[in-house]
């Protein structure tokens, strides 16, 4: 969120993991608790966050964008396809999205994906770009040679500073252009 603020934006990150108790320490425990919190529930969490931002006195009226990473990238795309409140979407290495799930998406989309992503195949973003172009959705796809999944996350071992800096610059410039 600090990076968004430094770029001149107001941001909010809904905690879609709120169903997890503090005592959950294993993947099995996470899966058990999160299985009760569906993707539809997480999209509702995002809607509550967007509604909250809309009424804050420090938020300028007008356009709103959404950014997501991995599953959050998928959910940003799904939310944008369903919401009239979103005017631009940036998705980093989004989890797979079916064409039918974004068939109503008409706003500008920017995608970022590492070519050497071992978690979400880059082909998913290439296919998504083609699907969006076919329905006349404005879309940009940026690929990063040698970058793995989450290359923008400075806390991860596969962080790539130069690619991260370039990707973030592209994302914030895109949002500035789209959110007048």
Image: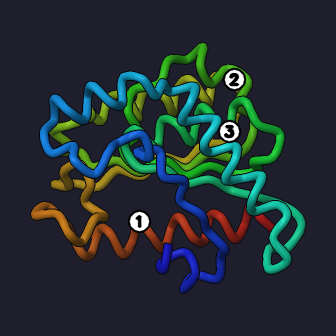
Q: Earlier in the sequence, mark 3 or mark 2?
A: 3
Residue positioned 38% across, 33% down in the render = 95
In the orientation shown, which residue stands out farthest toward the right?
Answer: 61
Marks 1 and 3, how far apart at CA: 21 Å
Residue that carries the numbered disc 3 in the rendered image: 80
Q: Is residue 39 left or right of residue 138?
A: left
Q: Earlier in the sequence, mark 1 or mark 3?
A: 3
**Could you tell me residue 71's position as x and y percent?**
40, 38
Asked where in the image residue 84 lies, by quadrant, the reply is: top right
Disc 3 versus disc 2: distance between alpha carbons? 15 Å
Neighbours of disc 3 within 10 Å: few (<14), some (14-19), many (20+):
many
Residue name at image x 17 percent, y 63 percent: 156
Looking at the picture, how far across and down is residue 83, in whole percent?
Answer: 76, 36
Q: Secondary structure at mark 3?
A: helix
Q: Which mark is residue 135?
A: 2
**Residue topped by disc 1:** 167
Left or right of 24? Residue 105 is right
């Amino acid at each position: 969120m600090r990076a968004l603020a430094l770029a001149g934006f107001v941001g909010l990150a809904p905690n879609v993991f709120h169903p997890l108790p503090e005592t959950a320490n294993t993947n099995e425990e996470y899966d058990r608790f999160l299985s009760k919190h569906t993707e539809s529930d997480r999209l509702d969490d995002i809607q509550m966050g967007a509604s909250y931002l809309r009424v804050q006195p420090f938020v300028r009226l007008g356009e709103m964008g959404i950014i997501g990473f991995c599953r959050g990238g998928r959910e940003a795309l799904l939310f944008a396809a369903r919401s009239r409140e979103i005017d631009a979407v940036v998705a980093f290495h989004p989890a797979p999205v079916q064409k039918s799930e974004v068939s109503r998406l008409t706003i500008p989309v920017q995608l970022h994906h590492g070519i050497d992503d071992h978690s979400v195949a880059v082909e998913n973003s290439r296919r998504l770009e083609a699907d969006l172009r076919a329905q006349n959705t404005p879309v940009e796809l940026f690929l990063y040679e040698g970058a793995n999944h989450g290359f923008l996350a400075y806390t991860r071992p596969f962080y790539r500073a130069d690619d991260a800096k370039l990707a973030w610059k592209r994302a914030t410039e895109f949002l500035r252009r789209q959110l007048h």
